[in-house]
Image (cartoon, coloured by chain):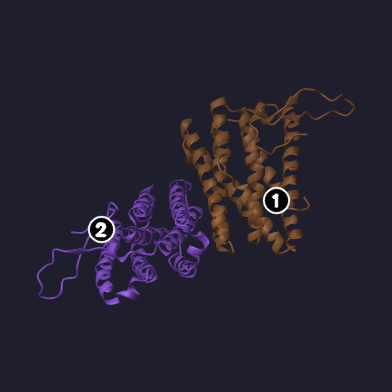
Chain colours: A purple, B brown
Amino acid sequence: MVTWFGRQKRIEIPRLKPRGEALPTTRVDLGELTPELLPYFGQAAYFELGLFQTLAQVVSTAPALASKENLAPAAGVALTRYEGLVAEIRRHGGDATDAMAAFQPALDEFSHATRGSDWAELLLGSYLTAGLLEDFFLSLSDGLPADARHRVAQIFGGGSIEAVLVAELTACLAADPTLASRLAMWGRRLVGDTLLIARSALHVSGDLAAHEARVELRIEPVFTELIAAHTRRMDGLGLTA
Amino acid sequence: MVTWFGRQKRIEIPRLKPRGEALPTTRVDLGELTPELLPYFGQAAYFELGLFQTLAQVVSTAPALASKENLAPAAGVALTRYEGLVAEIRRHGGDATDAMAAFQPALDEFSHATRGSDWAELLLGSYLTAGLLEDFFLSLSDGLPADARHRVAQIFGGGSIEAVLVAELTACLAADPTLASRLAMWGRRLVGDTLLIARSALHVSGDLAAHEARVELRIEPVFTELIAAHTRRMDGLGLTA
């Protein structure tokens, strides 16, 4: 079994098994995809900047003061991750604005589309999109040089955004059990847009263009696993994925 | 001349001079007012939490990506100040939610009322209200026990919110000189509401009730100086206060 919990530095995923062939012992991972540094950090940084803004809105619109108090540090974690990623852009000789600019239209639209119609949907959108995309950026970092990969692990390993979102979502669902079916539907609607953002990162790296068919074979199980992790998040909330 | 720049730990203010009397050599300061610890920290914390949310909105609605990048750290400074003030509430045996709750209605209304109608007004509102109220909370901290006063100085001394707001406001005014008269009017409208928030902190401390007339005499020059510092901020932007 592959697990994405615990944020391992390297996530190993079984190669797709051609029909009738014996189970291979070799494994592939996203590390072979070697993302280009500045687009990688630019997209991840702008995603975290958007997540920070969304979490600040979660704080602003929280119905109870205790929830604001619980959630404010999560917004701080996203901001700290953003600042760490911007520092990587500069460390690699890039300009942060330039590196992020290409991703602004798609990520702004994504952020808008995953915002939802009320506070519970905003919470769920933050939780599911952050969970999926941070897992994805972390696994994509396997293809970076060792020192950058190490710092990315530190950036995404510092603090926790998910725990408080799960706690607040669980409280929302306990207070209003009728919410479950609407949130389940919202979770299903989010996942497609979120996977498209992940896939766009691979396109930017140039790998798809260079080795399209071979790389598609490698990406497929990664996306299967991203969806499986998404399903586990939904299950954890008692929602049907 | 009294100056409020540089965030001195103790701000000395000349006593009001009764007509015809020789200039007194004694001085009064807010340190004699001795705020109650938990209401002091509760109000300051909830103000910083609101400022964080406002600055996150400044980032969200910034017209240029470079401005978002410049302003995001300022939101982080407000969040760090909030977290430092919440830590003080807990250090003194209080519950952060309880300590902040009494100030939520007035500060939420204040935050809403000082938000303005566009991005430039939102920026100016953040700058002027943060400048005035952080100066005020810092000077009120003179009445706290020495260790708490020292930590308050560290909390408000860490990072800078004002520099980037001045830079962005200056850029707005340079790009559109017709903005100056509208922003000048907005700055004048803000100051009354902001001083009322400051005055409410003194009421909460109980000092006004105990020594109303005597304390009013002491507060008056403090408010005169808060207004003078506000005028210097407006002047610094080339706006008529």
Amino acid bearing label 1: Leu
Pointer 1: residues within 10 angstroms few (<14), some, or many (20+)?
Answer: some
Outermost front residue: A93
Who's the residue at 53% across and 33% down the image? B38
Dot 1 corresponds to which residue? B190
A72 lies above or below A114: above
Q: Position of residue A226 (x, y in %)?
A: 29, 64
Q: Secondary structure at mark 2?
A: loop
Amino acid bearing label 2: Ile
Q: Secondary structure at mark 1?
A: helix
Which quadrant of the figure has residue B122? bottom right
Q: Nearer the viewer, mark 2 or mark 1?
A: 2
Q: Position of residue A200 (x, y in %)?
A: 38, 70
The CA span between labels 2 and 1 is 54 Å
In the rendered image, residues at marks 2 and 1 fall on the same chain: no
Q: Is residue A120 left or right of residue B47?
A: left
- Split into 4 quadrants, where in the image is the N terminus of chain A? bottom left
Pointer 2: residues within 10 angstroms few (<14), some, or many (20+)?
Answer: many
Which quadrant of the figure has residue A142? bottom left
Q: Position of residue B141 (x, y in %)?
A: 61, 32
On residue A11, the disc is 2
B159 lies above or below B70: above
B5 lies above or below A84: above
- Split into 4 quadrants, where in the image is the C terminus of chain A? bottom left
Label 1: chain letter = B
* Residue B214 visible in the current orientation: yes
Label 2: chain letter = A
Frontmost residue, A45 versus A77? A45
Q: Position of residue B162 (x, y in %)?
A: 63, 47
* Residue A240 visible in the current orientation: no
